[in-house]
Amino acid sequence: LDTSESGRFDVTAQSGTTSFIGGRATPTIGFNQPYLGPVVRVQKGPLQPKVANALSWPVSSHWHGLLVPGEHDGGPHLPIGPGSNWTPDMQIDQPPCTAFFHTHIHGRTAQDVYAGLAGVIHIVDGHDAERGLPETYGTDDLTLVIQDRRFAGDGRLAYANSMMDIMHGMTGDTILVNGQIGTAAHVPKGIVRLRIVNASNARIYSLRLSDSRPMHLIATDGGYLARPIALETLRMGPGERAEILVDFTSGHDVSLVSDGDPNQGMGGMMGRARGMLDGLTGARRFEVLPILVDERLPVAVDRIPDTIGGKAPSLADFEIAKTRRFSLDMGMGGGMMGGFAINGDPFEMAVVNQRVRLGDTEKWVVSTTMLAHPFHVHGVSFQVVRENGRDPLPESSGWKDTVVIDGETELLMRFTQPAGDRTPFMYHCHILEHEDGGMMGQFTVT
Ligand code: C2O
Ligand code: CU
Ligand code: CU
């Protein structure tokens, strides 16, 4: 959906069926279509969506990655009832980036996103050609929504059948790219841009190209880097986005592949006995998407640019008004499913956990003791200053809103968007089963 003229677009949450596997109808949900939603192209200025709900239960539309006030954020305090709609009146004023939107109703985010209720947002400014970046949507600028799913014998999506699916998060044995199994991308014999969205519930990917050619990282969650960084592997947790350039001037096809998920590796024995890890997880590498060169497609860019001109995060220069610590907790029992909490407190709709002053810069120190958790904060872009006791990974060196915590990580963030008590912002683990289970907190910015 191109909103660049008016800033208006309409999406409707609806149910339908999708034929993922030949001849089987899988019940799914999506925005404007049976599974997933449209890519919405947005420019600076007014953005006035109308989000309607044609389902029989409440949904919301959280703009993950948009810097908008709490009242427009689409989190758990902004449910859209069956047959109702929601019309936030937003102003977009942030650099170009790849963001996404998904339902965020507490306690059912995981199952509804799993069933398909998510879409993609591109913030664009019309200057990508000057930056030397491919920008032709669907030709040399491809959007890849990566998800893993498990199917039951009758073609239905299998969801959370075991304690392990909740404890480690729901992973699948089948990769979907843009809602399709076994698809391939066709690209010109030039430089190609991939906008990758990890919209999986729980899986952490370590992406690479099958012939080890570099992935030139140009953007992280919050926008462009100052210059491309050549990577061999790109780690992406749920909720993270990355844009890479891949050089196809040689004319050689390649496969986007991933190594196993570190969280699932720990589940080793149980998972393997049930067959769910087989072929897709553990230490094994699996294919995500074959990318094939089609010489008939027009080549717009034939070299990797030296600079892109994004503004590197520089919050270290600001005075830190406050340091807060967060421990991402899981317990093993006590009757609580998973015992998910932050600083010992499971999420409560009525409890504001933190109060931040508008305009302040703060340091958030986030740690985990069990499993790796993709930590996401609403309403800000942050800078990673220490990552699990080391300098940030290259994929964490730009502006971020979600980062995998696998130890202790320090984040700097400057709060520019207000959020009051009625619609506070969330911070949470983006393994959606953990989030629904209580590994989430909320904060006001006033
Ligand atoms: Cu993408 Cu609070 O989530
Ligand atoms: Cu978000
Ligand atoms: Cu988690």
Image: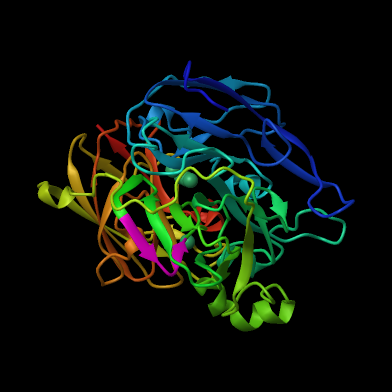
Q: How is the image coloured?
A: rainbow
Q: Which residue is more in the foreground, 292 or 316?
A: 292
The answer to if 259 sits in the magenta stretch is no
Q: Looking at the image, which residue is at 68% across and 22% down?
A: 83
Among the 4 quarters of the image, the one containing residue 64: top left
Q: Residue 337's x, y, as percent?
A: 57, 62
Q: Which residue is more in the foreground, 26 or 354?
A: 26
Residue at the top extreme?
Answer: 6
Residue 418's place in the image compared with 135, above or below, is above
Kindly report the secondary structure that dominates the magenta region of the rendered protein: strand
Among the 4 quarters of the image, the one containing residue 216: bottom left
Q: Looking at the image, which residue is at 56% across and 80% down?
A: 283
Is residue 398 visible in the rendered structure shown here?
yes
The number of discs equals 0
Q: Residue 106's x, y, as percent?
A: 54, 43
Q: Which residue is more in the foreground, 328 or 360?
A: 360
The answer to if 232 sits in the magenta stretch is yes
Q: Which residues are magenta?
A: 228-236
Quarter of the image for the N terminus: give it: top right
Quarter of the image for the C terminus: give it: top left
140 on left or right of 131: right
Residue 297's place in the image compared with 63, above or below, is below
150 on left or right of 200: right
Is residue 327 visible in the rendered structure shown here?
no
Residue 207's place in the image compared with 101, above or below, is below
Residue at the right extreme?
Answer: 23
225 on left or right of 81: left
Q: Residue 148's x, y, as percent?
A: 64, 59
Q: Residue 389's x, y, as percent?
A: 26, 72
